Image (cartoon, grey):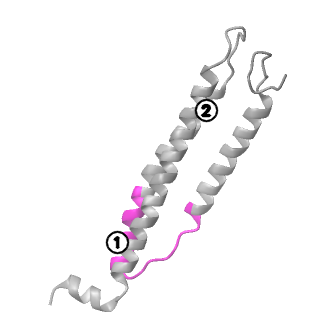
Amino acid sequence: MKNTELKGRENPSRARDHLANERTYLAWMRTSIALMGFGVVIVRLRAFHPPLVPHPGNGWKLGLLFSIIGLVTVLISTLYYFVVRYAIDDGNYEPSTRRVLFFSLAITLLGAGVIYFLFAAPLSPLSSVVPE
């Protein structure tokens, strides 16, 4: 009997566990794409300043940080996908709380940066956001 057939008999929900792992991985991929896209949006919005504003600000740094966190999310989630895959095959999977805490903290800090960025950026008199 093959080794994979034996493992399949030991864990009857193995296929379901692998499919759940793939769904989780794809959810992390969507999150990373959203983070990178939001970073690009922040940078592009800061580029549309009126010409009278001498210093467009440091919004590009926040946008770059979002994009970097998105790339890190891709790398970590891909690594974690394979760690979970092998743990499911070996029958010793234990959920990780460190990864969840790390990304929760990172998104909280990025969200705080966006809030600060929105309220610290000076509004110009030519801005269409300010009602007249």
Real-space Cα separation, disc 1 to disc 2, in angstroms: 38 Å
Determine whether, in the image, residue 82 is placed left or right of residue 107.
left
Specify the principal SS of the magenta part: helix
Q: Are marks 1 and 2 in contact (CB under 8 Å)?
A: no
Task: Give the quarter of the image for residue 131.
Answer: top right
> Is 83 within the magenta?
yes
Q: Amino acid at mark 1?
A: Tyr
First in sequence: mark 1 or mark 2?
2
Question: Within 10 angstroms of label 2, few (less than 14), some, or many (20 or more) residues?
Answer: many
Residues shaded magenta: 78-99
Looking at the picture, how far across and down is residue 101, in whole percent?
Answer: 62, 61
Badge 2 marks a residue whose secondary structure is helix
* Label disc, if present, on residue 17 of the rendered structure: none
Residue at coordinates 66% horizontally, 53% vertically from top-left? 105
Q: Residue at 40% across / 58% down in the picture?
A: 79
Q: 14 or 125: which is nearer to us?
A: 125
Tell me the number on the disc at residue 86: 1
Image quadrant assignment for residue 14 = bottom left
Residue with the mark numbered 2: 42
Q: Look at the image and tell me in which quarter the C terminus lies.
A: top right
Q: Dot 1 lies on which element? A: helix
Which is nearer the eye, 117 or 5?
Answer: 117
In percent of width and height, residue 27 lies at: 48, 59
Q: Is residue 89 magenta?
A: yes
